[in-house]
Image (cartoon, rainbow, N blue to C red):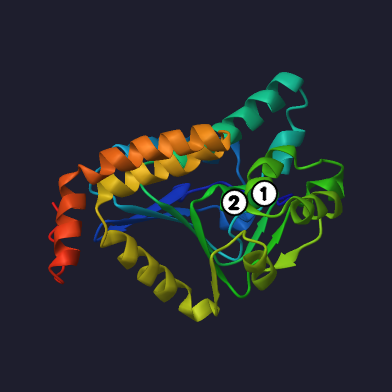
Amino acid sequence: MSAQPIVPETDPLLLWRQEAGVLHLTLNRPLQYNALSEQMLAALRQALAKIGADASIRVLVLGGAGKAFCAGHDLRQMRQNVRLEYYQGLFAECAALMGQIRTLPQPVIARVQGVATAAGCQLVASCDLAVASEAARFAASGINIGLFCSTPAVPLARNMGQKQAFEMLVTGDFIDAQTARARGLVNRVVPHEQLDAEIEGLTAAILSKPAHILAAGKSLFYRQQDMGIEAAYQLAVQTMACNVLEPDALEGIDAFLAKRQPNWR
């Protein structure tokens, strides 16, 4: 979490770069380690609303400028607003942001080049996929200043084993990128200089698949997690049956049987 002095921000809070169906969205408060100020949360929520409605964007890559991916909430801003209503609103806004990532039709990849702590670690855990540099480190560090990372606990417990997540929450200790991968917090770990190439390979694999089927699959993936196994299978059966009737699915089956590449819509 950041306790850095806030300096006037002349650059946009978010940097946008789109190419070949992939949008790179970069948190741009490097001097504050990309801490999630009220303004940053609002900017991210507005950006995700636009991205979700833009069919030209097939994949979202979320990164951070500078040395850190994201250092959590802006502690200096929080300390200036000591009111229960303020904190309830702040954390609700952060939780809503994490939920937006989950309901976004596009797959979201966290590009983690540096530290991700507290709500920054929550942000990584909330993304659909995560690729990390070997230099990246992760911590649910709120407990070190007397704040149990209650909201980060929600996605952490859904990414990692229960005891592994709880250990991070009660110790505040950092784990390195390879440990994060072993525990399920990130998908891939590569040397820093290979980070963008690795993400490019992952996005290429996603771009080769039908967008609307990926969107339906992502929705099913998260909805079934909140259900009992019987209800989850009922939803999955209905979703998959409808999926098979999609023209792209029928084309994919025909292409497989004919030993040729599919021609997606």
The residue beneath circle 2 is 125
Q: Is residue 262 visible?
A: no
Question: Is residue 73 depicted above or below 86 in this figure?
Answer: below
The label on residue 156 is 1
Q: Which residue is drawn at 86% across and 54% down?
A: 171
Quadrant assignment, res 253: bottom left
Q: Is mark 1 on a helix, strand or loop?
A: helix
| Picture residue at 55% right of the left edge, 33% below the top | 227
- Whether the residues at callouts 1 and 2 have beta carbons within 8 Å, the answer is yes
Give above or below for 83 relative to 242: above
Marked residue nearer the N-terminal end (1 or 2): 2
Residue 228, image x, y percentages: 58, 34
Q: Considering depth in this image, is 170 or 141 the residue closer to the camera?
A: 170
Work out which residue is located at the far top of the displayed protein and give it. 85
Q: Residues within 10 Å of mark 1 (few under 14, many from 20)?
A: many
- The one nearer the camera, 179 or 64, is 179
For image coordinates 85% across by 49% down, the residue present is: 170
